[in-house]
Structure formats: C-alpha cells, structure tokens
Amino acid sequence: MSSDQARLDELFELKKRKLNEQKQAASKFQHALTDPDGCLENSRLKLKNLAAGIVASRQPGYFKYHQDNERVAQIESTNELPKLNKEIQRLGNDLANIDSEIAEIQARMRKPSEPPKLDSLSQWVATYGKVSDPNPDRVSSFKKSSKVYGGTKHYPSFKSSATTMKRGLCTK
C-alpha cells in the first residue's frame, strides 16, 4: 500500500470521527433548544405569559411573570449554546480542511492519461476497433456539380468545386 493510500485511509477515519463529534454536538444543541424544558418552549411560554400580562395590566392587582426553568437558567448561565455553536463551526472547519487534503491526495494519485499516438487509419482501427454503420439501410451518394461559372473579359470561367450529397434508402 502506498503512503498516499495509507494517508487517505487515515484521513477517512479522521473524517468519520469528526463527523460523529459534530453530530453529537449538533444533537446536544438541538436538545437544548427543542426539549420540552428547552429554550424554545421557554420562549413560547414567556411570550404567552407576557400577552396575558398585558391583558391583566388593565386590571388592579399583581401578575406573576413566567420564570425560566432550571434547565434554561443553567443553559444561559453557562453559555452552553454559544459554546456548542463554536464547537460545531470548529468541527466544520476541520472537516473542510480534511476534505481539501483528501482532494489533493486523490488528484495526485490520478495519473493523467495521454491519448495514444495515431498516425494512420489502420492504427486507429487497431486501437478503437472497426466502425459499425449505425444505419445499414441508408445510403448516401455524392455527385460533383457540373456547373461552370462563365467568365468575362477580365476573369476566366471556372468549374464549381461543389459536391451534392443525396440521401436515400437501400433496396435489396
């Protein structure tokens, strides 16, 4: 196994590990947001409570506003979401670097193929095989034009070099 192939295998394993780490960090981030006691539900409850507070403010008395639950308070106090976001971005940058290194190695491993040198039709046939007629029932005939363009005092007449192709069906 070449050193490039060994490095490729190593990079693919590293990429697999980084993708799993990124998946775990994204999962933690999603759970912090979408769990029943997560940030999104807490925001929804706060908005609902504020709307009720606005209605209740027209009446006398005290209105108790929504307080964050323990989980949301812990998330906000430890700055968990920004840390997870930075971790996901760092892993994404690592993955981009790994992908670029993989692409470099794969480009190095691909050898540019040179087309074979062909000097004659027989070499072409030997390399690529005989050409088969895609339409064996069709026939083309070529006829040279007999037109002669007349001359003048200053210019001589000349025969046309045009060829007319006629298409047709071959009858057997």
Image (cartoon, grey):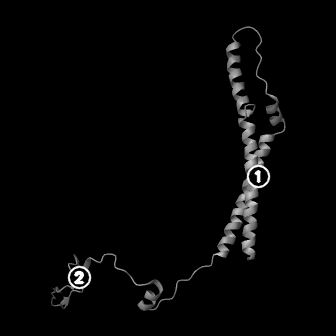
Identify the residue at horizontal 70%, vertical 9% (top origin): 59
**Residue drawn at x 20%, y 89% as measured from the top left:** 159
- Image coordinates of residue 167 in percent, x first then y, are 23, 76
**Relative horizontal placement of residue 49, taking residue 76 as reference (left or right):** left
Find numbered disc 2 in the image and state the secondary structure of the residue it sits on.
strand
For disc 2, the marked residue is 141
Residue 151's image quarter? bottom left
* Residue lying farthest to the top in this orientation: 60
Q: How many marks?
A: 2
Relative height, residue 73 to residue 123 (above, below): above
Residue located beneath label 1 in the image = 21
Location of the C terminus (image quadrant)? bottom left
Residue 46, quarter of picture: top right
Q: Amino acid at mark 2?
A: Ser
Is residue 19 shown above or below 49? below
Quadrant in the picture for the N terminus: bottom right
- Front-most of 46 and 106? 106
Residue 6 x %, y %: 75, 72
- The answer to whether 77 appears left or right of 131 in the picture is right
Identify residue type, mark 1. Glu
Which image quadrant is residue 43 in?
top right
Q: Earlier in the sequence, mark 1 or mark 2?
A: 1
| Res. 34 visible in picture | yes
Tell me the crowding category of disc 2: few under 14, some 14 to 19, or many 20 or more residues within 10 angstroms, Cα based: few
Name the element at disc 1: helix
User: At 29% across and 78% down in the image, what residue appears?
Assistant: 136
Q: Image point 43% across, 84% down: which residue?
A: 129
